[in-house]
Image (cartoon, rainbow, N blue to C red):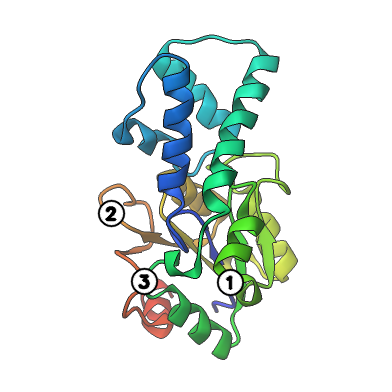
Amino acid sequence: MIKALIFDLDGVITDTAKYHYLAWRELALGLGFDFTEEQNEQLKGVSRIKSLEILLEIGGIIVDEDIMEQLADKKNTRYVEFISKMTPDEILPGVVDFLKKAKTEEYKIGIGSASKNAQTILNRINLNSYFDVVIDGTKVHKPKPDPEVFFKAASELNVKPEECIVFEDAEAGIEAAVNGGFHSVGVGNSKSLGSADYTISGFENVLIEDLIKLIE
């Protein structure tokens, strides 16, 4: 029986991926190489340091650990500048209605995100009240596809993995859900999210009861 819904944040609740990309590209250009949107797909759902490692590998750049930290902080500072200007208008279509229905139906609701800025984003888009727990990159150590973030969310929601549906837009996130024994719904392109139990293009006109029938 499904008792809880756990949502990734970036690309599922709101589109912050564009801000990540802009911040990473600025960093890359400052290091002397370009970084494309296609290359940025490799960074979806992974931690900040792992993303930086991928970026530097693309640019053929090797730095020591101290410089890595400085570069990661520089990217994050720029990203925070972008998201600090976000508004509720940036919530993806259908999300608010879906969350309202979930609350009405008394499902437990959580965030399971690799982002270390999840709370800032939720504050900016006024969605805090919908989530019973927010587990983000400040509370976990292992990046997706390790299921740690979802295990912690389930634990704080007091439910078992098999009682949860995870909503993810990244392949690494779907893998994390599968690895942890969670049900999963891919949000986006079904071709890249083929490991999910079911995929949707977005939340507009999506009914919770229909999803649960398909999942269970």
- The reply to whether callout 2 and callout 1 are in contact (CB within 8 Å) is no
What residue is shown with label 2? Answer: 189
Amino acid bearing label 2: Asn
In this rendering, the answer to whether 178 lies above or below 76 is: below
Q: Nearer the viewer, residue 32 or 112?
A: 32
In this rendering, the answer to whether 107 lies above or below 16 is: below
Q: Nearer the viewer, residue 118 or 156?
A: 118
Amino acid bearing label 1: Leu
Pinpoint residue 153: horizontal percent, then vertical percent: 67, 61
Pinpoint residue 117: horizontal percent, then vertical percent: 63, 50
Q: CA distance from mark 1 to mark 3?
A: 14 Å
Q: CA distance from mark 2 to mark 1?
A: 25 Å
Q: Circle 3 sits in a helix, a strand or a loop, which is it?
A: loop
Position of the C terminus, as image quadrant, is: bottom left
Left or right of 130: which side holds 41? left
Instruction: Name which of mark 2 and mark 3 comes first in the sequence.
Output: 3
Position of the N terminus, as image quadrant, is: bottom right
Taking the spot 33% from the left edge, 67% from the top edge, the residue there is: 202
Judge the density around disc 2: few (<14), some (14-19), many (≥20) Cα neighbours within 10 Å.
some
Mark drawn on residue 127: 1
Pinpoint residue 75: horizontal percent, then vertical percent: 56, 32
Left or right of 212: which side holds 156? right
Q: Quadrant of residue 37?
A: top left
Instruction: Name which of mark 2 and mark 1 comes first in the sequence.
Output: 1
